[in-house]
Image (cartoon, helix red, strand yellow):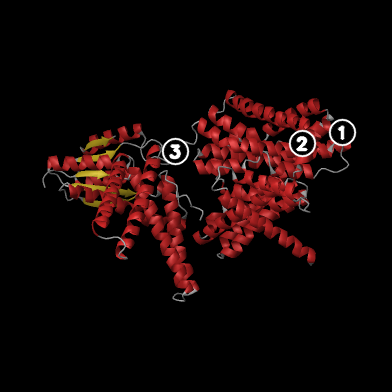
Amino acid sequence: MTGRPIVCATRGGEASRRAQERAIALAREQGAPLIFLFVADIGPLKPSKDLVDVLTDELEQLGASLLCIAQARAHEHGIEAAMVIRRGAVRPALESFLREVDAGTLVIGAPERGAEHPPVFDPAGMDHFAAQIRAGLGVEVVVVE
Amino acid sequence: MENFLAVETLIILLLLVVCVVALVVRRVRLPYTVALVLVGLFITVKQPLAFEVTPELILALFVPPLIFQAAFHLEFNDLRDNLVPILTLAVPGVLLSTLIVSGIVALGVGLPLTIAVVFGALISATDPVSVIALFRTLGVSRRLAVTVEGESLLNDGTAIVVFNLALAAALTGSFNLVTGVIDFLWVALGGLGIGLALGWVVARLIALIDDYLVEITLTTVLAYGAYLLAEQVHVSGVLAVVAAGLVGGNIGPRGMSPTTKIVLYNFWEYLAFLANSLVFLLIGLRINVIELTSHIVPIVVAVGAVLVSRAVVVYGLLWATHALGSRARMPLAWQHVVFWGGLRGAIGLALVLSLPRDLASTSQLEVMAFGVVLFTLLAQGTTIQFLLKRLKLSERFPPIVAREVRLGRLYAAQAGLRRLVDLHQDGLLTGDVWAGLRDEYNRTNQRLADEMTQLFVEHADLEREVVLRARREALRAERSALGDALRQGLISEDVYRELAGAVDRRLEALTLIGASIGAPMEDSGE
């Protein structure tokens, strides 16, 4: 494996499968390592205190299941992808991880229309975030519709 | 004692009828409440029961659990987001409806205006139980359902307050507008105040207790206690229950363990089912069809008045709120549903039955009220589904329907294959016949699985939903296994509670996750 890693951030939303396939294709083209990332962010769920731990745990379990599915898909295409789960607010956790692994590309699904409550990114917010990541970290951002 | 046994026998028979109707109605396309009324009518025609439906029975026994349960499930945020249309329909809407109905009825039937106002008030409260049930079944927009349910909760209280003021005016022959407005505010705000205060106290108590049986009993005390206390001090019992239910449902659960929440939601669902079923069955049992047919003209006038007033209230007031700058604009298609879904039910009948016998035209008002309720249930209640479909408000997200179709086929095909395996193992299916059938079933299963995979490629969120649902099923199996272990004496009650509580917390967490990604776990209140 050569090149800076490709990070595919996934939450299992509508475009996530297409984003994963795009990330797998890029990893094959570039021969770069592929990492599937899930951020368990319980903030928007506003849980009561007694639910915080168990909610985090369940969200991580959901993430682990989704990442395992993505990993299996990558394996089918001959790519051995890593999977990582991080906790916290999505944007800072993503930025911090991209910096940590010195990622070359971030592949992410386009914002869902009205599916998440509240949405992590709205379309304008996504454009702004992508521009920030490109400028600040030098990471190429691929938004998959 | 004999009398007690006779009443008990009657209740058991009515519950048996309720069960039969609930089961049969699944096979026929008829709203449950409408079916109950029809069965009640049928029983009355065949053999009238010696049974008196008193207003106290409906208002003090059946209405509190119905209102409490509905308010309990209504979230503050949903209510706040839809407050403008809800309050518009529930307060000025009821006042306007009372005026329009009374005007038309006074002119059309020749009732004295004071009596007509009493009728206008008592018939203005909507009771869309069957409509709300249909909304849930058809997956209609939550905002529309909240508006219809919120309106019906609050307009019950408004209608009862206006009814009492109108009745006092009719009996005394005098009415002072200023006093009337002050009385209205006192009765309404007093009821809300009592409900809020009791709701808060009970929510605080619940936070201190960790015993689900006591906590559920406290909510029962809250629902009925709020009603009784408010009525004792002559303020609105219904509004007290609404406020108590809202506070109880929004603040109370914060102090409850997940186990308590699950049992509590089940308890109130059951109590509301019982109350709702008996109310509508009793409505059917109380209606005298022969009497209705002999008063057809006043009934037709009353029905017309109710429809005209509903149209003016819904289309007129909602347009006015928008014209006055409210941003909460309701689509026209929704307004049609709010108009046609404005069924009348238990509150109107309880109020008309509470009229003093010495009031002029009481029997005529009774017949008119029963006629209106019957019309709205039979005509509007049975056609609202058609309207929702025509307006395309009940259309489900096509990929979800597609997934269900494939899942259904896959489920059926696998059951078929299992049966063939049984036959093969019993030696009843052998050789090429067995091999041919097995291969064909395997091909079908593979094709369906491939189709499902393709669907997930296009809509990966469905795959996430499947993961969540599978996890929930697994947790429910874990909980069930814990119950088995307890029954078999493998674990003690304390250990069971601790472990079952942990599973319940996980189920609750899944409900939160499901709601946040727009994939509600349908039995969140299990």
**Mark 2 element type:** helix
| Residue B116, quarter of picture | top right
Residue B7 sits above or below residue B489 on the image? above
Q: Residues within 10 Å of mark 2 (few under 14, many from 20)?
A: few
x 66%, y 30%: residue:
B310
Q: Give the labeled residue for mark 1.
A: B174
Left/right of residue B232 with respect to residue A12 in the rendered view: right
Q: Which residue is mark 3?
A: B396
In front: label 1 or label 2: 2
Q: Amino acid at mark 3?
A: Arg
Looking at numbered disc 2 in the image, what kind of residue is underneath it?
Thr
Asked whether the viewer can see residue B194, the reply is: no
Quadrant of residue A102 in the image? top left
Residue B484: x %, y % from top left: 45, 70
**Residue B214 drawn above or below residue B324:** below
Between B17 and A83, the residue placed more toward the observer is B17
Under tag 1, what secondary structure? loop
Mark 1 or mark 3, which has the lower sequence index?
1
Q: Nearer the viewer, mark 1 or mark 3?
A: 3
Judging from the image, mark 2 belongs to the subunit labelled B
Label 1 vs label 3: CA separation?
55 Å
Give the side of residue B480 with respect to residue B127, left or right: left
Q: Are discs 1 and 3 located on one and the same chain?
A: yes
In the picture of the structure, the residue carrying the numbered disc 2 is B293
Q: Quadrant of the C terminus of chain A?
A: top left
Q: How would you rate the neighbour count of disc 1 (Cα within 10 Å): few for under 14, some for 14-19, many for 20 or more? A: few
Q: Position of residue B363 (x, y in %)?
A: 83, 39
Compared across the picture, whether B28 is left or right of B434 comes to right
**Is there one chain holding both mark 1 and mark 2?**
yes
Secondary element at image label 3: loop
